[in-house]
């Protein structure tokens, strides 16, 4: 069983960034981690050719912390970039305000 749930693969989206410049973005709007702890994610870019699949580049994320339900500090407000992507048609859950769990 994988520790990840949801969409673990993304195609590239041609979107405008926060400075209104065109860019290629890979969006993982429905990805969650099932296990409490600190983790890093590896993102790998592949090219599909007539010959097969070629791994072009990999990068490791910063450390992310996954909390237990009781220790979860609450959802933060969505970033400007996330809201911008949503406005351009990317399906994302957008938070309008910070919610603290009681």
Image (cartoon, helix red, strand yellow):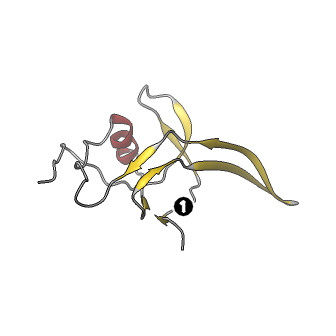
Q: How many marks?
A: 1
What residue lies at 33% left-to-right and 42% top-to-bottom?
83
Q: Secondary structure at mark 1?
A: loop
Residue at x 39%, y 48% (from the top left corner)? 65
Residue at 43% across / 25% down in the picture? 19
Quarter placement of the C terminus: bottom left
Indicate the position of residue 61 as horizontal and vertical percent values: 54, 42
Figure quadrant of the N terminus: bottom right
Residue 99 or residue 70, whichever sits in front: 70
Q: Is residue 5 left or right of residue 92?
A: right
Between 21 and 40, the residue placed more toward the observer is 40
Residue 81 picture quarter: top left
Q: Residue furthest left?
A: 102
Q: Is residue 56 left or right of residue 11?
A: right
Relative height, residue 51 to residue 14 (above, below): below
Disc 1 crowd rating (10 Å Cα; few below 14, some 14-19, many 20+) is few
Identify the residue under disc 1: 8
Figure quadrant of residue 67: bottom left
Residue 48 picture location, percent across and down: 76, 57
Percent coordinates x, y for residue 90 in the rendering:
42, 52
């Amino acid at each position: 069983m994988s520790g990840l749930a949801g969409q673990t693969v993304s195609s590239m989206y041609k979107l405008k960034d926060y400075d209104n410049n065109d860019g290629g973005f890979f969006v993982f709007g429905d990805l969650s981690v099932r296990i409490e702890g600190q983790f890093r994610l590896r993102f790998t870019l592949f090219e599909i050719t007539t010959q097969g699949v070629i791994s072009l580049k990999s990068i490791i994320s910063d450390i992310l912390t996954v909390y237990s339900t009781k220790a979860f500090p609450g959802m933060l407000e969505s970033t400007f970039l996330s809201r911008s992507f949503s406005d351009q048609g990317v399906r994302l859950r957008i938070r309008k305000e910070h919610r603290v769990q009681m």
